[in-house]
Amino acid sequence: MAHDTPQVRDGVLTLKQTDGGGAAIPVESSDWWHWLDEPQTTIFRFFSRQGSFTARRERKSGGQYWYAYRRHQGKLHKAYLGKSEELYLARLDTTAVLLLKQFEHHTNRFNHN
């Protein structure tokens, strides 16, 4: 369910638990790095003032890499995040800005045609 997807807001990962409770893990803490490396961790949502996206871990070329996805006006935009050990808060924020710029470029291109 979408509302059960782990979420990062204000630098904190929030996990829903089966008992209805939740856990809060600061991004870049040891618990954050441990959570990212767990085999069942494949998705989370990221929200900031710069924008939002869904992060997904995918297996490619024998490794596992994270990608950011965001849909805007029916078009899916994708950005490379990196390996788990590269998912610092600054990188997540920068990617949110990158996706926002992709949207603006896409929107401006269609508004001028």
Image (cartoon, rainbow, N blue to C red):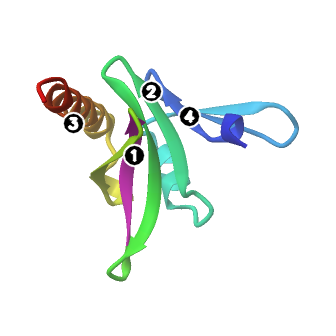
Amino acid identity at mark 1: Tyr
- Neighbour tally class for label 3: few under 14, some 14-19, many 20 plus, Cα within 10 Å: some
Q: Mark 1 and 4 residues: CB-CB less than 8 Å, in contact?
A: no
Compare residues 51 and 113 and report the one nearer the observer: 113
Residue at label 2? 47
> Which residue was labeled with disc 3?
102
Front position among marks 2 and 1 = 1
Q: Are marks 2 and 4 in contact (CB under 8 Å)?
A: yes
Query: Is residue 11 highlighted in magenta?
Result: no
Residue 104 lies, in percent from the top left, at: 21, 27
**Mark found first going from the N terminus, 4 or 3:** 4
Foreground pick, 66 / 36: 66
For label 1, the residue is 69
Residue tagged 4: 7
Q: Magenta residues?
A: 64-72
Name which residue lies at 57% across and 61% down.
Answer: 38
Q: Residues within 10 Å of mark 2 (few under 14, many from 20)?
A: some
Give the foreground label among 4 and 3: 3
**Secondary structure at numbered mark 2:** strand
Cα distance in 3D space between marks 3 and 1: 11 Å
Instruction: Name the residue located 50 percent from the left edge and 61 percent from the top edge.
Output: 37
Image quarter of the N terminus: top right
